[in-house]
């Protein structure tokens, strides 16, 4: 073989080998593990996307929420809605989202029963109570205790809607997320730590209607999640608690993630 041919082969082999090595170090489309992400939509509304691609809306107060970004008021898609309790600033757009995307709505039995009078199907599989777990696709949803109230105002009077709840979301191949809902701190948060060992805790911090920064810091200690996301603050003047106030009180080793409204963070 002529010398110049050998040199050409050698050059091509180097190029091909370099290409193969570079490709082997790059994530392959379709094989890369997706992260679980959380997007704050203002107040106590969140969008969560699981590694399998399931999109969850929690307490979807979108319309009427002054801090929800305009581009987030109309969901592009939804696979599951979860509601912690019956107040309007948590039920929000749940019925409209469920109707539009034909997706389940998981809520405590009285809240879910009331929603069945607002156009949703009466489906007992979507109405657990505290301690109950429902699987929807790749996600297990468990209702926990919370200290608050639960009602709606209709026909000039308050309508009782059962008891408030927290929620534990356990996506397959994803972190365990505890969403406290509207609550004060209570000692049995230590049981949530013991039973579910959450990786992330979403805690209300606004004060007045829920716990403020002092109680939220103690709640973070009891729950024991290494990462905390604040919620239920900044919407109205009465909600005076701030992430900075919580951050200053958190125990060592607990990270506070405080996304801006509309911002997505990886969990």
Image (spheres, rainbow, N blue to C red):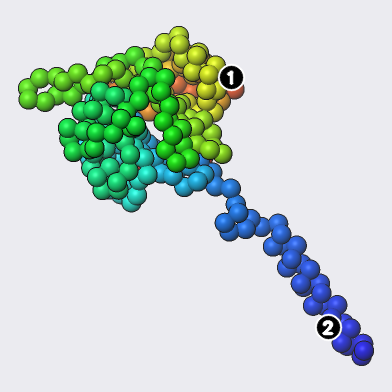
Residue furthest bottom as drawn? 2
Q: CA distance from mark 2 to mark 1?
A: 61 Å
Can you identify the residue that label 2 sits on? 8
Vertical order, 211 against 104 (above or below): above
Q: Does label 2 or label 1 sit earlier along the sequence?
A: 2
- Does 17 sit left or right of 105 as displayed? right
- Does 125 sit left or right of 238 as displayed? right
Vertical order, 73 against 224 (above or below): below
Q: Position of residue 15 (x, y in %)?
A: 77, 73
Front in this rendered view, residue 178 or 266: 178
Residue furthest left as drawn? 156
Vertical order, 239 against 123 (above or below): above
Q: Position of residue 120 (x, y in %)?
A: 22, 38
- Does 1 sit left or right of 250 as displayed? right
Image point (46%, 32%), residue name? 140
Can you identify the residue that label 1 sits on? 252
Image point (48%, 23%), residue name? 247
Residue 53 visible at all: yes
> How many residues crowd around disc 2 within 10 Å: few (fewer than 14), some, or many (20 or more)?
few
Image point (50%, 36%), residue name? 171
């Amino acid at each position: 073989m002529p010398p110049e041919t050998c040199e050409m082969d050698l050059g091509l082999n180097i190029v091909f080998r370099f290409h193969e090595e570079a490709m082997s170090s790059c994530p392959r489309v379709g094989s890369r593990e997706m992260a679980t992400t959380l997007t704050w939509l203002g107040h106590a509304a969140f969008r969560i996307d699981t590694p399998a691609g399931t999109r969850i809306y929690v307490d979807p107060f979108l319309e009427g929420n002054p801090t929800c970004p305009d581009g987030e008021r109309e969901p592009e898609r939804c696979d599951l809605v979860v509601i912690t309790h019956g107040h309007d600033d948590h039920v929000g757009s749940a019925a409209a989202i469920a109707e539009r995307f034909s997706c389940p709505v998981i809520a405590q039995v009285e809240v879910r029963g009331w929603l069945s009078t607002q156009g949703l199907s009466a489906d007992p599989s979507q109405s657990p109570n505290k301690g109950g777990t429902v699987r929807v696709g790749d996600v297990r949803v468990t209702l926990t205790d919370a200290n608050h109230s639960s009602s709606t105002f209709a026909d000039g009077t308050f309508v009782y809607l059962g008891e408030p709840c927290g929620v534990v979301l356990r996506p397959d191949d994803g972190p365990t997320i505890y969403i406290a809902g509207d609550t004060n701190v209570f000692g049995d948060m230590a049981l949530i730590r013991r039973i579910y060992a959450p990786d992330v805790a979403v805690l209300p911090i606004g004060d007045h209607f829920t716990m403020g920064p002092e109680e939220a810091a103690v709640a973070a200690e009891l729950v024991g999640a290494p990462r905390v996301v604040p919620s239920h603050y900044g919407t109205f003047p009465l909600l005076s608690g701030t992430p900075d106030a919580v951050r200053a009180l958190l125990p060592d080793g607990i990270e506070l993630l405080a996304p801006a409204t509309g911002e997505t963070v990886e969990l």
